[in-house]
Image: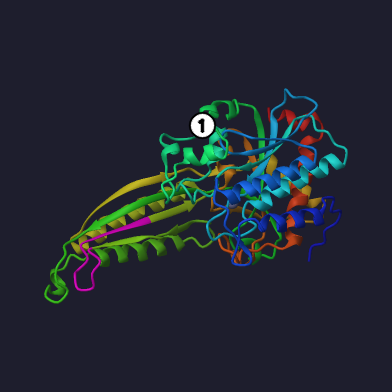
Amino acid sequence: MQTTEGITINQVRLDERIEQLSRIGRIADTGVCRLALTLEDMEGIIQVRLWMEEAGLTTRLDAFGNLIARLEGTDPSLPLLMLGSHIDSQPYGGRYDGAVGVLGALEAVQCLMEQGIQPAMSIEVVAFCDEEGSRFNKGLFGSRGITGQLEEGELERQDKHGVTRREALESFGCSPAQFAESVYPPGAIGAYLELHIEQGPVLESIDAPVGVVTGISGPLWLTVTMKGMAGHAGSVPMEMRHDALVGSAKVIAAFDEMVREDPGAPTVGTVGSLRVFPDSRNIIPEEVSFTVDLRDMEMARRDRLEARLMQLLEDISKQHGLSYSLTVDTNSEPRYCAERIKSMIHSSAEAMGLTLPELMSGPFHDALALSHVCDYGMIFVRSKDGISHHPSEYSSPEDITLGTEVLYRTVRQMCNGHTVIDTFS
Ligand SMILES: [Zn+2]
């Protein structure tokens, strides 16, 4: 059992804020529904903004719908340290996803101020707009916005009621015409830190309250279509069939086995969606489309698996007399956390008597967008049963306190004199 000492952050204040925020958009007793750019989201922003101002920070809502609080440093010419996460949620979401990161970051900075520390570089705490991507089917909106990574047509995306992103932003008082003013110039952000719940079972399985993230794995998203020949289920003899579903099932099962081959590797592969045509009990399936989600921290290993999947498609199609085609929907590379930030997180924890394990992040976070403009680090807090995006999502107040204390101490190290800051410029 590890012992921890010297908690500086205000645990009671942090717990109360997490609890209070979770009452906004509350569903199913313990869950929340705060879809991006909705009234519930705005209510959350108003509440968090109030706490930020109470702490003595200056706040603004930028053109992308990001809530940003700023602590002015003594040397405004230095690149700033950004801390953040999001407070929007999935439609049937948990109360910790994102909220812990925003309120933990605020607690860390408020604690710094209460300790009488004014850093050389400015620090900003951000609640990013629409991390989840649930409403408009594309996430990381605010963090991609400030880093200049929005794509064509994003403002015209509609939610299921036909409301466009543009209309939703305008209802928030945010003007797309002013996007350019809210983009940070290159070099303006020196480093980014994010505290988040793990949303997976790894920390719990090794009995660790907090972990250091090594990087965010790169997802490869494919849509595969296999095509055969329909026919009456009662009349076509088995040896004459070209059953697209049987072929797809073999590919899916073999893919799963292939991804499992290296038990020590963090590789994960999932087929989560299947469409069968014509989808009738007495017709042999003619066409099947399925999605592939393949993630790994090591690009070379992921590439090898992708190549083997292609071979599998080739072989099984031949066996069953099928044709196949595929589209690449997303192909991102893994993004690694900065070694020096990781080592600062480790040493912060060691000073508390904690040894932190390292793990990768399968899900993406706002840190993924920030990783393209600055060094970043992430701290994970243990999730109960690995459950997330669900009302039963849970992380204990004790674990959240430890994670936030590690964040606070890491921020403090980064503020400690110019030498550390210089390495980010
Ligand atoms: Zn999240």
Give the left or right position of residue 130, taking residue 271 as reference: right
Q: Residue at the spot x=67%, y=58% of the render?
A: 23
- The boundaries of the magenta stretch are 278-291
Q: Which image quadrant is residue 210 in? A: bottom right
- The residue that label 1 is drawn on is 176
Residue 168 screen position, x and y as percent: 50, 42
Instruction: Tell me, yes or no, whether the highlighted magenta stretch contains residue 285.
Output: yes
Q: Quadrant of the N terminus?
A: bottom right
138 inside magenta stretch: no
**Image position, residue 239 (x, y; %):** 14, 72
Query: Measuring 33% from the left and 58% from the top, which residue is drawn there?
Result: 290
Instruction: Give whichever of 265, 77 is nearer the camera.
Output: 77
Mark 1 sits near ligand 1, with its Cβ under 8 Å away: no
Residue 378 in view here: no
Is 254 located above or below residue 9 in the figure?
Answer: below
Instruction: Name the residue at 77% across, 30% down.
Output: 72
Is 311 placed left or right of 242 in the picture? right
Colour scheme of the picture: rainbow
Residue that protrudes farthest toward the bottom in the picture = 234
Residue type at the position of mark 1: Pro
Is residue 239 in view?
A: yes
Image quadrant where one finds the C terminus: top right
What percent of the width, then of the height, locates residue 63? 57, 33
Q: Residue at the spot x=67%, y=37% of the render?
A: 68
